[in-house]
Amino acid sequence: GEQVEQRPPHLSVREGDSAIIICTYTDSATAYFSWYKQEAGAGLQLLMSVLSNVDRKEEQGLTVLLNKKDKRLSLNLTAAHPGDSAVYFCAVSVWEGGRALIFGTGTTVSVSP
Amino acid sequence: EAAVTQSPRNKVAVTGGKVTLSCNQTNNHNNMYWYRQDTGHGLRLIHYSYGAGSTEKGDIPDGYKASRPSQENFSLILELATPSQTSVYFCASGRQGDAETLYFGSGTRLTVL
């Protein structure tokens, strides 16, 4: 089955710097790619999602890149601010009659002023 | 206005006891999911459901049962709780056919002594 690896597990950056998180997956049939953010004590919230026909998507200071050849998905937090401090998860899906997302192991991002 | 509500928020149980975690959603979504979150593992799918009356096994169903008596409610049942089931449990809902967008509850922290 699909395997998802996420790195790094922890990331500390200064305010204004970029933070990049990378996920690799194994199933070339993977069709959906998402990034979720989990703030302390809360559930996960969708940040951005892309379909497999999209290589790059930018929204509100976030950039998602999809490299299907290398089976790699990345999230770039450009100009990070303290409010970006959270745990970030990638999630992928090969839609098999309702199977849910497969999540990466998470990256704890800390942004210091 | 929380659309996915879990109860209880925290639970302490004894080994061998029965535990029921409840989830209610007001999104009118067909699909509902139970995940557990553990350090180093990310979120792992336990059970999911396509609608009232349906339950499906996820990736780690052993030791858990699920019940979907209505569109709105999805329960996770631990008939004989074990310390290895100490974790944070998340419920989520999603639209049929929208694989990449899940809406999460705030989680239940379960400790089995």
Image (cartoon, coloured by chain):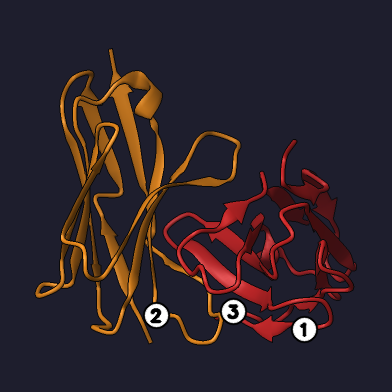
Chain colours: A orange, B red
In-image side of B82 versus B104 (left or right): right
Amino acid carrying label 2: it is Val
Q: CA distance from mark 2 to mark 1?
A: 21 Å
Asked if badge 2 and badge 1 are on a common chain, one would say no
| Residue drawn at 82 percent across, 61 percent down | B72
**Quadrant occupied by the C terminus of chain B:** bottom right
Nearest to viewer (mark 2 / mark 3): 2
Please give the label number shown on residue A94.
Answer: 2
**Label 3 neighbourhood size at 10 Å, few (<14), some (14-19), many (20+)?**
few
Which of these two is toward me, B95 or B23?
B95
- In the image, residue B102 lies at what x, y percent? 55, 58
Asked if badge 2 and badge 3 are on a common chain, one would say no
Amino acid carrying label 1: it is Ser
Q: SS class of the residue under badge 1?
A: loop
Which of these two is toward me, B18 or A55?
A55
Give the residue number, with chain letter if any, for mark 1: B54
Q: SS class of the residue under badge 3?
A: loop
Please report, as a chain letter, where disc 1 is located.
B
Q: Earlier in the sequence, mark 3 or mark 1?
A: 1
Please give the label number shown on residue B60.
Answer: 3
Q: CA distance from mark 3 to mark 1?
A: 17 Å
